[in-house]
Image (cartoon, rainbow, N blue to C red):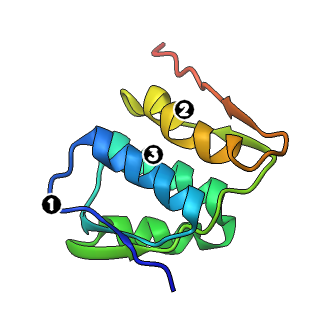
Amino acid sequence: MQLPVELGEATAPSLLDGALALALSTGAPLRLVGPLNGADAAVVMAAARIGDAERLDATRTALSRTGPVELALGHARAGVHVLDLREDGAVPRALWALSWPLALLGRPSELRHRQRWISAA
């Protein structure tokens, strides 16, 4: 059993992103304090999609809880990953945090961002 990557309350975004990258690279669980909102939650959900798509609903529910949360993201999976990130600042954070766990796999992978424009008519 791997030791978890532990974060405290109100973790700085750069520390959260680095912890996500480390957890995806090693398969270690991630411990943090919820709830997470905005770009923080979006980047964690993107990591969950790259790690283990079967646990998305459980991850979403865990992020909305108040108090300690442990997430088992699994290892990063090679392939084409399409991210839909709408929160301010989430795109560069996700690209930074998720690209190197995929690069360590040694197999072809892509991160794509899908942008949806909403027009106010």
- Report the amino acid beneath label 3: Val
Q: Quadrant of residue 9?
A: bottom left
Report the residue marked by disc 1. 9
Mark 3 crowd level (few <14, some 14–19, many ≥20, 10 Å Cα): many
Residue lying furthest bottom? 1
Report the residue marked by disc 3. 43
Q: Earlier in the sequence, mark 3 or mark 1?
A: 1
Residue lying furthest top? 121
Q: Earlier in the sequence, mark 1 or mark 2?
A: 1
Taking 35 as reference, is 72 above or below it? below
Mark 1 crowd level (few <14, some 14–19, many ≥20, 10 Å Cα): few
Residue at (54, 32) in percent of width and height: 95
Find out whether the residues at labels 3 and 2 contact each other: C-beta distance under 8 Å: no
Residue at (66, 56) in percent of width and height: 76
- Report the amino acid beneath label 2: Leu
Taking 105 as reference, is 54 above or below it? below
Q: Which mark is residue 110?
A: none
**In x, y percent, where is residue 49?**
62, 56
Report the residue marked by disc 2. 95
Left or right of 70? Residue 1 is right
Element on which disc 2 rests: helix
Residue at (59, 72) in percent of width and height: 55
Element on which disc 3 rests: helix
